[in-house]
Image (cartoon, rainbow, N blue to C red):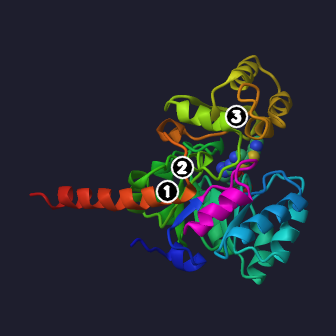
């Protein structure tokens, strides 16, 4: 049994969130993760509110357990999406790519738990003061939009800076990472990349195969000049963007090269010209399996590793 404040706060069995990945985490995936005892999270990305409403219905068709919605704070549909979240009384909101401060009062009023993804101690402290329920400390190893600090130094510094529960994200794919996160003071983890290869994940099979074939050095970060650096699997688009940045292209030009490319990869399956956002753990993901098996593998391997650690710690 593994139980933390996160389990009690949300009413879930395992303190494991599935990352709310845009164009990846739809109702099918989120429903499967929640039904299996974790927290499934729909990634609303830059999708319109009507899409979100359909995905929420898909989750509710397969589970009565709590689920979350991730809001991407740069979305043009943010206000409408927020309205759907409020009307549907979604249990948990995670946020990314910005500061959700101004939405906190309305969400608190309806009892929605607010758990922002942060990449710095400063934002974690500000949001804790503003009344969020927990934070997800996401390190540079993760896929998609990244901060500058790696998970190992980021998590304990945020744990020491706030009193609310902290989850760790970035670089976690099995029981060893889960246990390491707990050792750093986290009370749960969020995993994205491994869930891309869940059976219930409906992204293009070509993307899944690319993740399965990836090695640990196959991701790269581009887009620093735009202020929104993203980690993706290396491909033609990544090489072109890196070259354009080297050649001094303007932030606007770089931003344009990435527009629409996440959908192109994840939905259309164009893994050369699309943006295949994935974390450094892509190299460790070796099979396609049900979401439930992913959750159980993390928990069971954490328990095995814990017994092994206890033997080591008790020696001498
Ligand atoms: O948000 C993510 N990961 C994402 S969002 C996304 S969609 C996108 N596509 C192209 C460009 C940008 C986004 C794909 N992956 N993770 C959470 C996260 N949030 N990582 C970093 C941040 C972050 C960064 C700066 C949060 C806040 C922030 O500054 C806000 C402030 O006011 O300090």
Say whether disc 1 or disc 3 marks the residue closer to the N-terminus: 3
Give the SS element for disc 2. Answer: loop
Q: Position of residue 276 (x, y in %)?
A: 68, 35
Residue at x 74% of width, y 20% of height: 240
Q: Residue 154, can we see it?
A: yes
The residue wearing badge 1 is 293
Say whether disc 3 or disc 2 marks the residue closer to the N-terminus: 3
Q: Is residue 123 left or right of residue 260?
A: left
Q: CA distance from mark 1 to mark 3?
A: 36 Å
Q: Nearer the viewer, residue 40 or 261?
A: 40
Q: Are marks 3 and 2 in contact (CB under 8 Å)?
A: no
Which of the two discs, 1 and 3, sits closer to the camera? 1
Pointer 2 local density, CA inside 10 Å: few below 14, some 14–19, many at least 20: some
Query: What number is the disc on residue 200?
Result: none
Give the SS element for disc 3. Answer: helix
Examine the image and state in which quarter residue 156 appears. bottom left
Q: Is residue 101 left or right of residue 150?
A: right
The magenta span reads 18-41
Give the SS element for disc 1. Answer: helix
| Rendered view: 92 above or below 20 | below
The residue wearing badge 3 is 224
Q: Are marks 2 and 1 in contact (CB under 8 Å)?
A: yes
Residue at x 51% of width, y 67% of height: 15
The residue wearing badge 2 is 289
Residue at x 64% of width, y 44% of height: 146
Q: Are marks 1 and 3 in contact (CB under 8 Å)?
A: no
Q: CA distance from mark 3 to mark 2?
A: 34 Å
Pointer 1 local density, CA inside 10 Å: few below 14, some 14–19, many at least 20: some
Q: Position of residue 274 (x, y in %)?
A: 75, 31
Quarter of the image with the C terminus in it = bottom left
Q: Nearer the viewer, residue 56 or 100?
A: 56
| Rendered view: 250 above or below 138 | above
């Amino acid at each position: 049994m593994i139980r933390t404040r996160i389990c009690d706060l949300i009413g879930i069995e395992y303190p494991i969130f599935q990352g709310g990945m845009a164009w990846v985490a739809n109702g099918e995936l989120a429903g499967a993760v929640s039904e299996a005892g974790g927290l499934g999270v729909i990634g609303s990305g830059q999708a319109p509110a009507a899409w979100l409403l359909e995905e929420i219905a898909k989750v509710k068709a397969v589970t009565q357990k709590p689920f979350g919605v991730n809001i991407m704070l740069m979305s043009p549909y943010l206000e409408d999406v927020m309205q759907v979240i409020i009307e549907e009384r979604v249990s948990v909101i995670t946020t990314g790519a910005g500061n959700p401060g101004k939405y906190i009062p309305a969400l608190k009023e309806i009892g929605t738990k607010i758990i922002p993804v942060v990449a710095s101690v400063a934002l974690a402290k500000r949001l804790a003061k503003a009344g969020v329920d927990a934070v997800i400390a996401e390190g540079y190893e993760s896929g998609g939009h990244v901060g500058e600090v790696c998970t190992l130094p980021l998590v304990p510094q945020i744990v020491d800076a706030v009193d609310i529960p902290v989850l760790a994200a970035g670089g976690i794919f099995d029981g060893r990472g889960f246990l390491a996160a707990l050792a750093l003071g986290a009370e749960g983890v969020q995993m994205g990349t491994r869930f891309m290869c869940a059976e219930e994940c409906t992204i293009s099979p070509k993307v899944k195969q690319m993740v399965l074939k990836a090695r640990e050095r196959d991701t790269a970060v581009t887009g620093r000049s735009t202020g929104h650096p993203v980690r993706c699997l290396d491909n033609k688009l990544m090489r072109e963007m890196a070259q354009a940045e080297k050649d001094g292209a303007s932030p606007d030009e770089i931003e344009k090269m990435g527009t629409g490319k996440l959908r192109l990869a994840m939905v259309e399956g164009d893994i050369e010209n699309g943006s295949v956002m994935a974390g450094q753990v892509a190299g460790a993901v070796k099979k396609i399996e049900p979401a439930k098996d992913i959750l159980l593998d993390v928990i069971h391997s954490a328990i095995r590793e814990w017994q092994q650690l206890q033997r080591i710690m008790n020696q001498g």
